[in-house]
Each structure stands twice: as C-alpha cells, then as structure tokens.
Amino acid sequence: MILKGGARAIAVSSSYDDGTDRILPDSPRAEWLWEFAVAHDLVVHIHPPMLSVGHELLMRYRLNQRLPSDYFKTNILVDTMGFNPIGVRAAVELCGIDRVVFGSDFGAIPYGIEEHIKIVEDVLPNPVEPELVFWQNSNKIFRLGMEG
C-alpha cells in the first residue's frame, strides 16, 4: 500500500516483544522504521498498549529518555480520543493546535460521535480551531487534497 497504493502512514505498536527482546520506537533495532518513514514521507502512528496508563507504562514509551518538550510541537500528533475536555485542552496547549487531530476509537466506549464532536467544539470555541482538528490538520499531514 505504501509503495504502490499511495498510503501516507504506517501504524506500529509502542513496543514489540518482551524482556530483553523488547523493541521500542527509539531502539537501534527500530532504526529501519524511521529510515523507511523518512524515505517515503510517511506519518508514523504509534499506538499505546491497551492497558491503563501508569508509571510503568510511561516507562515503556521511553519518553523519559528525552524531555517531552523535545518531541511535542515537532513530530507528534495527538488525537482527541478520550472523551475528556481537559485532555483535549491539554493536547492543544502542549502540542499546538496544528498537532491535534480528531480521533475516535469506538467500540467499548459508550459515546456516540455527536458527544465527541461536542466536546471538541466546546473546548475550542474559536470557529477556526475545530475545523483544524476535525479535518484540516489531517488533510495537510496526509496530503488528502480536500477542499474546504
């Protein structure tokens, strides 16, 4: 899909394998991924583990190797999944409005799309900002060519 189908992104887990065999995104053993992503101008989506977030899990992300401010506003996108106005506001303030995209992981979450849209609209009352989050940032990052 990337080489012949025009795909613009690749999704990877935040870690692979266990113990001393664990490969993390900043591991030398994962360097090929970043070289491939740069060579093909891809967005890399890193999905966190499917567990509650605590100190032990944050250590798996290995962001403690560098200051988070080294990452934010440069090469991280944050989606609005979470159904929490505080989280949406924090994402915008920490990463910048141009690094936040609308996200939804429906399934076990007992929210509909309308509730999720309302949270974003309530947190971002400026009429330009919700449009950035809902579609314009993704349009730009993934070069979708959508007209607004």
Image: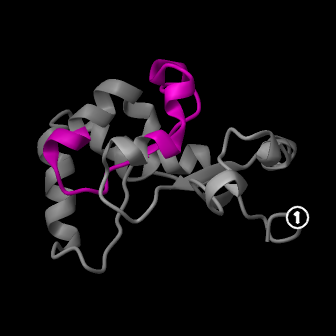
Reading the image, the residue beneath label 1 is 3
Residue visible at 85% across and 48% down in the picture = 32
**Magenta includes 100?**
no
At x 65% / y 50%, what residue is drawn? 44
Nearer-the-camera pick, 118 or 35: 35
**102 lies left or right of 147:** left
Q: Quadrant of residue 15?
A: bottom right
Residue 39, image x, y percentages: 87, 44
Position of 115 with respect to 95 (left or right) is: left
Q: Quadrant of residue 22?
A: bottom right
In magenta segment, residue 68 = yes
Can I make out residue 144 in this image? Answer: no
Residue at the extreme front:
20
Local crowd at mark 1 within 10 Å, few (<14), some, or many (≥20)? few
The one of 37 and 70 positioned closer to us in this rendering: 70
* Depicted 135 relative to depicted 95: above or below: below
Residue at 19% x, 57% y: name it. Answer: 83
Picture coordinates of residue 28 (x, y %)?
Answer: 80, 39
Secondary structure beneath label 1? loop
Give the magenta part as a residue range: 59-88
Amino acid, disc 1:
Leu
Quick check: 133 above or below 2?
A: above
Who's the residue at 68% across and 59% down the image? 10
Left or right side of 33 for 53: left
In-front residue for pair 17/104: 17
In the rendered view, does 58 fall on the left or right side of 27?
Answer: left
